[in-house]
Image: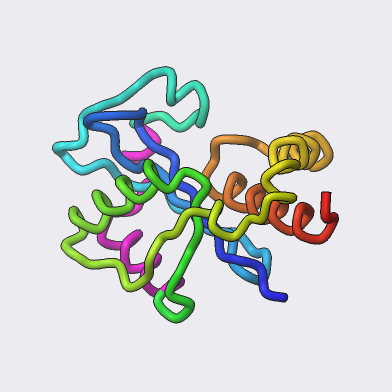
Amino acid sequence: MTLPTLLDIEASGFGRGSYPIEVGLARADGSVCAFLIQPQNEWTHWDPKAELLHGISRSRLEREGYPAIEVARWLNDELAEIGIAYSDSWGYDSTWLSLLFHHAGMLPRFRLEALRSLLDESQLSCWKRTKEALIRERGIQRHRAGEDARLLQLTYLRTRDAGC
Protein backbone atom coordinates (compact mmCIF):
# COMPACT_ATOMS: atom_id res chain seq x y z
CA MET A 1 0.00 0.00 0.00
CA THR A 2 1.29 3.45 -0.94
CA LEU A 3 1.97 5.90 1.85
CA PRO A 4 0.13 9.23 1.81
CA THR A 5 2.16 12.30 0.93
CA LEU A 6 2.45 14.53 3.99
CA LEU A 7 3.08 18.26 3.91
CA ASP A 8 4.21 20.41 6.82
CA ILE A 9 4.83 24.14 7.06
CA GLU A 10 6.85 26.06 9.61
CA ALA A 11 5.91 29.70 10.06
CA SER A 12 7.04 33.03 11.44
CA GLY A 13 4.52 32.68 14.25
CA PHE A 14 0.81 32.07 14.67
CA GLY A 15 -2.15 34.26 13.92
CA ARG A 16 -2.50 37.49 12.03
CA GLY A 17 0.51 38.49 9.97
CA SER A 18 2.27 35.13 10.18
CA TYR A 19 3.66 33.61 7.00
CA PRO A 20 5.33 30.40 5.82
CA ILE A 21 9.08 30.11 6.28
CA GLU A 22 9.67 26.45 5.39
CA VAL A 23 7.68 23.80 3.58
CA GLY A 24 8.46 20.11 3.66
CA LEU A 25 7.10 16.97 2.05
CA ALA A 26 7.31 13.31 2.94
CA ARG A 27 6.68 11.59 -0.38
CA ALA A 28 4.82 8.32 -0.92
CA ASP A 29 8.15 6.50 -1.20
CA GLY A 30 9.27 7.82 2.21
CA SER A 31 11.79 10.33 0.87
CA VAL A 32 11.77 13.83 2.32
CA CYS A 33 12.39 17.24 0.83
CA ALA A 34 12.11 20.72 2.34
CA PHE A 35 12.76 24.31 1.29
CA LEU A 36 13.22 27.51 3.23
CA ILE A 37 11.10 30.39 1.93
CA GLN A 38 12.46 33.89 1.41
CA PRO A 39 10.19 36.41 3.16
CA GLN A 40 8.28 38.87 0.99
CA ASN A 41 8.91 42.56 1.78
CA GLU A 42 5.46 42.88 3.34
CA TRP A 43 5.96 39.80 5.51
CA THR A 44 7.20 41.52 8.65
CA HIS A 45 5.64 39.59 11.54
CA TRP A 46 8.27 37.68 13.48
CA ASP A 47 7.61 35.83 16.72
CA PRO A 48 10.80 35.10 18.68
CA LYS A 49 8.99 32.22 20.44
CA ALA A 50 8.39 30.54 17.08
CA GLU A 51 12.08 30.98 16.23
CA LEU A 52 12.98 29.21 19.47
CA LEU A 53 10.90 26.22 18.32
CA HIS A 54 12.09 25.86 14.73
CA GLY A 55 15.54 27.44 15.14
CA ILE A 56 15.36 29.34 11.85
CA SER A 57 16.28 33.03 11.94
CA ARG A 58 14.80 35.61 9.61
CA SER A 59 18.31 36.52 8.43
CA ARG A 60 18.88 32.87 7.47
CA LEU A 61 15.65 32.93 5.44
CA GLU A 62 16.81 36.06 3.66
CA ARG A 63 20.18 34.43 2.84
CA GLU A 64 19.16 30.84 2.12
CA GLY A 65 15.45 30.93 1.36
CA TYR A 66 13.95 30.37 -2.07
CA PRO A 67 11.57 32.92 -3.63
CA ALA A 68 7.87 32.12 -3.15
CA ILE A 69 7.41 31.49 -6.88
CA GLU A 70 10.12 28.81 -6.89
CA VAL A 71 8.67 27.03 -3.87
CA ALA A 72 5.14 27.18 -5.34
CA ARG A 73 6.40 25.78 -8.67
CA TRP A 74 8.23 23.00 -6.84
CA LEU A 75 5.08 22.09 -4.88
CA ASN A 76 3.01 22.01 -8.07
CA ASP A 77 5.65 19.89 -9.82
CA GLU A 78 5.76 17.47 -6.88
CA LEU A 79 2.03 17.24 -6.19
CA ALA A 80 0.06 17.91 -9.39
CA GLU A 81 0.15 14.30 -10.56
CA ILE A 82 -1.02 12.78 -7.27
CA GLY A 83 -3.33 15.73 -6.68
CA ILE A 84 -3.37 15.62 -2.90
CA ALA A 85 -1.23 16.02 0.20
CA TYR A 86 -2.20 15.72 3.85
CA SER A 87 -1.48 17.93 6.84
CA ASP A 88 -2.00 17.44 10.56
CA SER A 89 -2.56 21.20 11.00
CA TRP A 90 -4.83 21.81 8.07
CA GLY A 91 -6.22 25.12 9.35
CA TYR A 92 -2.80 26.74 9.67
CA ASP A 93 -1.06 24.98 6.79
CA SER A 94 -3.82 25.69 4.26
CA THR A 95 -3.76 29.39 5.21
CA TRP A 96 0.03 29.60 4.84
CA LEU A 97 -0.08 27.60 1.60
CA SER A 98 -2.68 30.01 0.19
CA LEU A 99 -0.49 32.96 1.17
CA LEU A 100 2.53 31.37 -0.52
CA PHE A 101 0.65 30.73 -3.76
CA HIS A 102 -0.95 34.19 -3.69
CA HIS A 103 2.46 35.86 -3.50
CA ALA A 104 3.78 33.55 -6.20
CA GLY A 105 0.91 34.62 -8.46
CA MET A 106 -0.07 30.99 -9.00
CA LEU A 107 -2.79 28.51 -8.14
CA PRO A 108 -1.99 25.17 -6.53
CA ARG A 109 -2.52 22.19 -8.82
CA PHE A 110 -3.26 19.94 -5.85
CA ARG A 111 -5.40 20.07 -2.74
CA LEU A 112 -4.42 19.91 0.88
CA GLU A 113 -6.56 17.70 3.10
CA ALA A 114 -6.62 17.03 6.83
CA LEU A 115 -4.58 13.97 7.80
CA ARG A 116 -7.34 13.11 10.27
CA SER A 117 -9.54 12.10 7.32
CA LEU A 118 -7.25 9.08 6.76
CA LEU A 119 -7.31 7.87 10.35
CA ASP A 120 -9.72 5.42 11.91
CA GLU A 121 -10.69 5.42 15.60
CA SER A 122 -7.98 2.92 16.49
CA GLN A 123 -5.29 5.10 14.91
CA LEU A 124 -6.64 8.22 16.59
CA SER A 125 -6.62 6.54 19.99
CA CYS A 126 -2.91 5.73 19.88
CA TRP A 127 -1.65 8.55 17.63
CA LYS A 128 -0.02 10.74 20.28
CA ARG A 129 1.63 7.85 22.11
CA THR A 130 2.96 6.38 18.86
CA LYS A 131 4.27 9.72 17.63
CA GLU A 132 6.11 10.37 20.90
CA ALA A 133 7.65 6.89 20.79
CA LEU A 134 8.93 7.50 17.25
CA ILE A 135 10.48 10.83 18.27
CA ARG A 136 12.40 9.06 21.06
CA GLU A 137 13.39 6.02 18.98
CA ARG A 138 14.61 7.93 15.97
CA GLY A 139 15.87 11.13 17.62
CA ILE A 140 13.72 13.19 15.28
CA GLN A 141 14.35 16.94 15.29
CA ARG A 142 10.95 18.57 15.73
CA HIS A 143 9.65 21.76 14.16
CA ARG A 144 11.49 21.42 10.89
CA ALA A 145 9.08 20.92 8.00
CA GLY A 146 10.66 17.89 6.32
CA GLU A 147 11.31 16.02 9.57
CA ASP A 148 7.81 16.76 10.88
CA ALA A 149 6.23 15.59 7.62
CA ARG A 150 8.19 12.33 7.80
CA LEU A 151 7.30 11.88 11.47
CA LEU A 152 3.61 12.16 10.58
CA GLN A 153 4.03 9.64 7.80
CA LEU A 154 5.87 7.18 10.06
CA THR A 155 3.21 7.61 12.76
CA TYR A 156 0.51 6.94 10.17
CA LEU A 157 2.30 3.81 9.03
CA ARG A 158 2.90 2.42 12.52
CA THR A 159 -0.67 3.11 13.71
CA ARG A 160 -2.10 1.58 10.53
CA ASP A 161 0.04 -1.55 10.66
CA ALA A 162 0.12 -2.09 14.42
CA GLY A 163 -3.61 -1.86 14.90
CA CYS A 164 -2.85 -0.19 18.26
Vertical arrangement, residue 13 with respect to residue 9, above or below: above
Q: Is residue 47 left or right of residue 134?
A: left
Residue 48 at x, y percent in the picture: 39, 18
* Extent of the magenta region: 59-79
Specify whether 106 is left or right of 23: left
Note whether residue 33 is visible.
no
Does residue 93 appear in the picture of this structure? Answer: yes
68 in the magenta segment: yes
Residue sitting at the far bottom: 81
Query: Is the magenta region chiefly helix, strand or loop?
Result: helix
Query: In the picture, which quadrant includes the N terminus?
Result: bottom right
Task: Decide whether residue 33 is among the magenta residues.
Answer: no
With respect to residue 139, does 7 lie above or below? Answer: below
Nearer-the-camera pick, 110 or 116: 116
Residue pictured at 35% horizontal, 59% vertical: 71
Q: Residue furthest top?
A: 49
Residue 16, position in %: x, y?
23, 29
Q: Residue at x 83, y 55 (%)?
A: 163
Give the residue displayed 35% in from the left and 21% down from the top.
Answer: 47
Q: Which x, y percent locates residue 155?
A: 71, 50
Q: Nearer the viewer, residue 104 or 14?
A: 14
Image side of residue 42 versus residue 32, left or right: left
Please indicate whether residue 40 sits to the left or right of residue 55 in the image. Answer: left
Looking at the image, is 80 positioned above or below residue 22?
below
| Quadrant of res 76 | bottom left
Which one is in front, 99 or 127?
127
Kindly indicate the quadrant of the structure image that contains residue 107.
bottom left
Identify the residue shown where x is 24% and y is 49%: 99
Q: Is residue 79 above or below residue 118?
A: below
